[in-house]
Amino acid sequence: MGEPDRTLDAVGPRLKHLRLRRDITLTDLAAETGISASTLSRLEAGLRRPTLEQLLPLARVHGVTLDELVGAPPTGDPRINLRPITCSDGSVILPLTRRPGGIQAYKYVLPASADDREPDLRTHEGYDWVYVLNGTLRLVLGEHNLVLTPGEAAEFDTRTPHWFGATSSGPVEFLSLIGKQGERAHVRAAPKPD
């Protein structure tokens, strides 16, 4: 059996895991993808090999890449092909850098949350710069409860108790640059024209 055969044979258990993780039925998944429930059942059981026409809507509905869905080995430059980390609360963290030391960059996507959600404040060594791309970010920083919108930024010493969350208005996407203690961003401004 060749590598493509083994890869396709392993898709069934991944499909079932993704469906059960989302806690939906085969009927619900069939409605979302346009693939019959009986075909989905056979795919999950490994009784049928998936086609690209089936894999594309399944990957889209489950919110994963085709590579993740089929368990393809990483290809190309790992600095470009970094894998997202999906957390149990539905948030996704995408590492944007992979080098030891220096500032580390991450993109966070947090699902909508209740506006009165009790924050779980954390502290750690370092310094954080946050920039909101889309949505509304709730940042609890010590005694301050801040709301940041697209284009707004915050910077703080991570020894200050802090917490990030979305609001009920929807999910939020933001960038986070985390550096070691005492490290600061270098801001350069263009000179004023004469």
Image: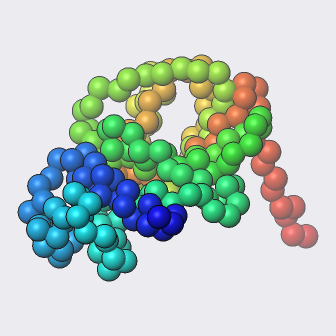
Q: Quadrant of the C terminus?
A: bottom right
Instruction: Check the image and tell me how it is coloured.
Output: rainbow
Q: Is residue 172 visible?
A: yes
At 33% from the left edge and 76% from the top edge, which residue is drawn? 51
16 displayed left or right of 78: left
At 11% from the left edge and 68% from the top edge, which residue is drawn? 38
62 displayed left or right of 81: left
109 displayed left or right of 99: left
- Residue occupying the far bottom of the picture: 53
Q: Is residue 10 above or below residue 115?
A: below
At 15% from the left edge and 53% from the top edge, which residue is drawn? 24
Residue 161: x and y in percent read 50, 20
Residue 54: x and y in percent read 29, 74
At 51% from the left edge and 60% from the top edge, which residue is drawn? 72
Q: Is residue 32 visible?
A: no
Q: Is residue 89 above or below residue 75?
A: above
54 displayed left or right of 150: left
Residue closer to the observer: 7 or 152 = 7
Residue 92: x and y in percent read 43, 47
